[in-house]
Image (cartoon, rainbow, N blue to C red):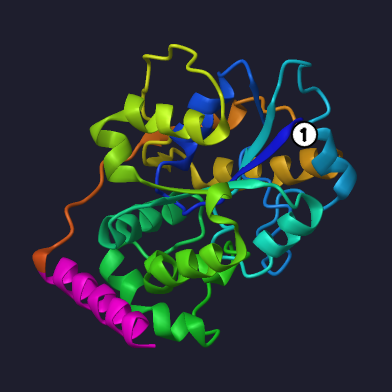
Amino acid sequence: MTQRLFIVGAPKCGTTSLARWLARHPAIHMSPIKEPHFFNTDMNNRTITRQADYDALFANAPPEARVLAEASTWYLYSDAAVPNILRAYPDARFIAMTRDPVEMAISLYYHNRFKLHEPLDTIEAAWAAQDRRAHGEDLPRDCVEPEVLQYRKVCTLEPLLQRLRRRVHPEHLLVLRLEDMRADARSAYLGVLKFLGLPDDGRTDFTAQNEARRPRSLFLSRAFKTAVKLKRALGITRNTGLTRINDLKLEKKVVSKKQRAVMEKAFEIALTKQSTA
């Protein structure tokens, strides 16, 4: 019987690397579109919105595929996604990935910069803008889902994991730390295969994917975003890789000790509130 696997997030926690590794396993068919976000119906960042288009992502699965999988990083944050998935696939399996919250927030900031969601050119400014943005103020025009700019809320993962554990049978849930995956990628990979009941395929290449990037041209980046939306509206799911010509590797700026301390304190307070709630 074919299993359904959902890598549900969190963003910037290694989901792209894991999805790429699993996609090369002969018994796994991974969605050709990473992050279809079909099931998070309470958010505005859905890539696939029609059932027929979602089903098409798995139409070409080979006969030997025992697992049909996809990875959408905002499923963990969404309140609707997991219940929607379980209604469609009651025996679905889930992988949630976690990370140090400060490093996650920093990485998410740079990801938002690349995706044109975040116009503020320092993480200090973006962090300070969270409360205003939560009230609908100073929202950038290129960000269709303002929640992605709530760095403190998004990167405080424990309440999201608690909610996930309440909804999913323990045997159907695997939580994986990015730090553990980086320390011993093969062991982490074998743990995932064991969770899925699949044999080792002998993989030894565990190259990290999805390094921080920035666009060469903002004009081209906006043009490519429009083209991608049009392509998907037409039901075209094949990834041409054309947008890569506009990519440059991003050299991240060092976050000041002062800003890091502000963030560490915020996450400490958030975790304290969770433990006493």
Q: Residue at x 21, y 51 (%)?
A: 253
Asked if residue 204 lies left or right of residue 4, the reply is left
Q: Which residues are magenta?
A: 258-277
- In which quadrant of the rendered image does the N terminus lie? top right
Asked if residue 1 lies left or right of residue 18, the reply is right
- Where residue 120 appears, x then y in whole percent? 38, 66
Give the quadrant of residue 159: bottom left
According to the picture, the residue beneath numbered tag 1 turns out to be: 57
**Depth check, front residue: 194 or 162:** 194
Q: Residue at x 48, y 80 (%)?
A: 133
- Where residue 24 appears, x then y in whole percent? 56, 19
Asked if residue 234 lies left or right of residue 24, the reply is right
Q: Is residue 122 above or below residue 207?
A: below
Label 1, secondary structure: give it. loop
Q: Tell whether position 118 is magenta.
A: no
- In which quadrant of the rendered image does the C terminus lie? bottom left
Judge whether residue 169 can be spotted in this image. yes
Q: Tell whether position 276 is magenta.
A: yes
Q: Residue at x 42, y 33 (%)?
A: 191
Q: Is residue 122 above or below residue 206?
A: below
- Where residue 29 appears, x then y in whole percent? 67, 26
**Depth check, front residue: 131 or 101:** 101
* Amino acid at circle 1: Leu
**Depth check, front residue: 38 or 106:** 38
**Depth check, front residue: 74 or 226:** 74
Q: Main secondary structure of the magenta part?
A: helix
